Amino acid sequence: DIQKAITSADMNNDSKVDYIEFRNNLREKGYSDVEIEALFAKYDLDGDRCLNDEEQKNLLKDLLTQHE
């Protein structure tokens, strides 16, 4: 679900996933605000409330590692 959220949450096609896009996508899948905030904060290293390309890659890499 999280991997799909990352790939589909960039609604405005700016190559960044902002918190609102990410949250709305995951809330539709049943995640709580606390879970979403914790996950987002872990990967939003610069604190700008957007996941840039590098931050998205880190999140996806960790997700792939967890599935192995």
Image (cartoon, helix red, strand yellow):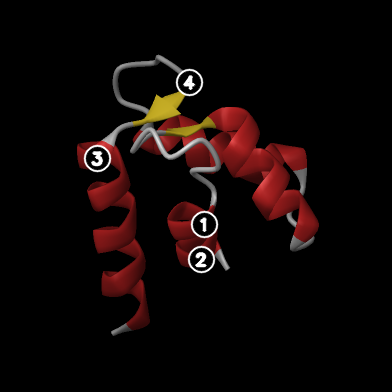
> Quick check: marks 2 and 1 in contact, CB under 8 Å?
yes
Residue placed under numbered mark 3 in the picture? 53
Assess disc 3: are there few (<14), some (14-19) or many (≥20) residues with their C-alpha within 10 Å of its C-alpha.
Answer: few
N-terminal-most mark, 4 or 2: 2
Q: Position of residue 39 (x, y in %)?
A: 51, 43
Q: Which residue is mark 1?
A: 8
**Separation (CA) of disc 4 from disc 2:** 19 Å
Classify the position of the N terminus by image quarter. Answer: bottom right
Name the secondary structure under disc 4.
loop
- Number of on-image labels: 4
Q: Secondary structure at mark 1?
A: helix
- Residue at x 77%, y 47% (from the top left corner): 32
Relative to 44, residue 56 above or below: below
In this rendered view, identify the residue nearer to me: 64 or 4. Answer: 4
What residue is pinned by disc 4?
Answer: 49
Measuring 38% from the left and 34% from the top, which residue is drawn there?
16
> Gap between marks 1 and 3, in whole Å?
14 Å
- Rounded to the nearest angstrom, the CA distance separating label 4 from label 3 is 13 Å
At x 33% / y 51%, what residue is drawn? 59
Which kind of residue does numbered mark 2 sit on? Lys
For badge 1, the amino acid type reads: Ser
